[in-house]
Image (spheres, coloured by chain):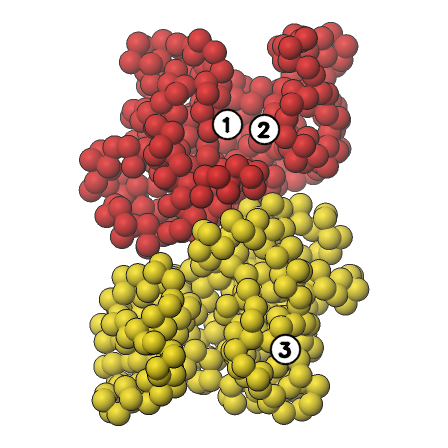
Chain colours: A red, B yellow
């Protein structure tokens, strides 16, 4: 049974000279696109599956967390059930099933994800209910990326990472701080679902009225998690709100100037630089790319 | 002035579990898509520019070697001229010019590349004429990748790399052998321009009748170089001829199952596995991806 550090792959660091020249900003990319299951979510998924005493885990996820925790459970010999809308892309359903998890397809017009999760919690009293972000084990799993950023030998003036529920940014803050690094951490959020930005302005968790309509499907969360908020409220330097236009431009720039296939959510951190270049102008910035799982049809349209 | 080892980036190693599962073959990717200038050609370009005593270098290249040597010369403070057909993609011309080289555009209907190179050789008697493959300095530069494969801690049963002029494969053989590794090296070549396969069968260099019509633009060479042939003739395990269909499938598989943006030439090594899975079935194979520079319009069509 591998420890978290043995199981995860380190982030891949890239200094994209063409992109640096194009923007005139000193950038390093820390990409999780080559992490197991193609996104940082494997870090959290593995840490959860490794540390809970339960032999079975269930969660609702139509995206990367489902794949991350499914593969983690497969590696650790635990059972896993992932609730997904029956409208999810076939490629995502197949990926989760391919990692050995039970895919529990629901018709969201008949039952909400939360209601189905409550049903499963009753049906499986000995199983652990996994959250994609609001869980100390998730934050701790993602903190391993903060450790890597602290240990990579570069003194960044800014780390920019996408934010949805806040699991990644809170983990990065924990990892950096416990290694004595006070590097400012910026969250990059779609303007179309700017609950984190509003939360930071108002000093308490603010929810989106509904699931935000953004290309960044990993950031379609309704609000930040409670555990995440405790860390983010004091720990975040700022939240940069990214328009869909800058998000698309960021996906294209990664393609053409860094040879990097990035999913829209993963491109938020570069989107933040495109949105507010003046904030990062004379800084050594680290762009965290959270994942690379994007359907070919969507990607072709973005390019 | 950096040494070759200080200037290059190590190849990025990826164990693509989804792709491994899909093919049922134990694979490791060694990708040069994040090398400086987006392909392995920077290794050779830098080694040439570093080691020739001349202050000026010229070459004919419409592809990755042009970018590699242009950037190398920029880093080393040398002048560089790159001859390119005036029909080259604007993005490629801009890339070479962006690295500070003089782009010498020719109308190939009026003058051949070789004739223009001969002219420049007369005009610039003190400049070094760089070849993209047929040069011991090129082989030596690429041998640094063979060193990395030898030192990566995995004992491969097969290394598969694309072949055009033979600079990459001969370099990998030199690098592996000088580190005591007898790992068989396979060359992956487009069937549409199979001069290397025919050369190996006939025991001497065979040329294509004309520039081959293949998507793998880095393998549109007319024949293997003399210096390369000396190493390849005894050093290659075999040449696998890859159809355009398998080449396209390989580009798509890298996209969907490894999150990797690969140019068609770079996908040849995976194409070889798709073409001859029986050869690699129970082997631990290393797939060398030579580069990632592909225009978005071409890539979208391939996907």
Tell me the chain of label 3: B
Q: Nearer the viewer, residue A190 or A129?
A: A190
Q: Residues within 10 Å of mark 1 (few under 14, many from 20)?
A: many
Query: Could you tell me how many numbered marks the image carries?
Result: 3
Which residue carries the number 1 mark?
A218
Kindly report the distance in space between the C-alpha atoms of the residues bearing marks 2 and 1.
Answer: 7 Å
Q: Are marks 2 and 3 on the same chain?
A: no
Q: Residue A290, can we see it? A: yes
Circle 2/circle 1 CB separation < 8 Å: yes
Foreground of the two, A170 or A254: A254
User: Marks 2 and 3, how far apart in space?
Assistant: 43 Å
State the SS at label 3.
loop
| Residue A158 seen anywhere in this rendered image of the structure | no
**Image position of B228 (left or right of A203):** right
**Which residue is found at the position 29% from the left and 80% from the top?**
B57
Q: Is residue A162 above or below residue B162?
A: above
Asked where in the image residue A124 lies, by quadrant, the reply is top right
Indicate which disc, 2 or 1, sits on the residue closer to the N terminus: 2
* Residue that carries the numbered disc 2 in the rendered image: A63
Q: Mark 3 = which residue? A: B194
């Amino acid at each position: 049974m591998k420890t978290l550090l043995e199981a995860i792959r380190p982030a891949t660091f890239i200094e994209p000279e063409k992109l640096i020249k194009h923007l005139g900003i000193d950038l390093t990319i820390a990409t999780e696109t080559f992490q197991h299951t193609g996104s940082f979510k494997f870090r959290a998924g593995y840490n959860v599956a490794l540390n809970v005493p339960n032999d079975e885990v269930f969660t609702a996820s139509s995206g990367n967390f489902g794949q991350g925790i499914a593969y983690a459970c497969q590696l650790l010999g635990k059972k896993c059930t992932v609730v997904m809308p029956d409208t999810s892309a076939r490629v995502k359903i197949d990926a989760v099933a391919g990692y050995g998890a039970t895919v529990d397809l629901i018709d969201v017009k008949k039952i909400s994800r939360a209601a189905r999760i409550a049903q499963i919690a009753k049906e499986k009293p000995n199983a652990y209910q996994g959250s994609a972000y609001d869980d100390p084990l998730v934050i701790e799993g993602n903190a391993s990326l903060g450790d890597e950023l602290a240990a990579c030998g570069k003194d960044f003036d800014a780390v920019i990472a996408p934010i949805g529920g806040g699991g990644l940014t809170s983990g990065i803050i924990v990892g950096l701080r416990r290694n004595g690094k006070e590097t400012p951490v910026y969250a990059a959020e779609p303007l179309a679902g700017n609950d984190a930005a509003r939360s930071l302005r108002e000093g308490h968790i603010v929810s989106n009225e509904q699931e935000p309509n953004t290309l960044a499907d990993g950031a379609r969360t309704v609000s930040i998690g409670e555990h995440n908020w405790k860390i983010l409220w004091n720990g975040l330097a700022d939240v940069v709100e990214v328009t869909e236009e800058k998000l698309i431009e960021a996906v294209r720039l990664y393609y053409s100037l860094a040879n990097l296939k990035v999913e829209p959510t993963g491109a938020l951190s570069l989107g933040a630089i495109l949105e507010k270049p003046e904030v990062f102008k004379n800084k050594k910035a680290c762009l965290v790319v959270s994942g690379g799982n994007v359907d070919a049809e969507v990607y072709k349209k973005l390019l």
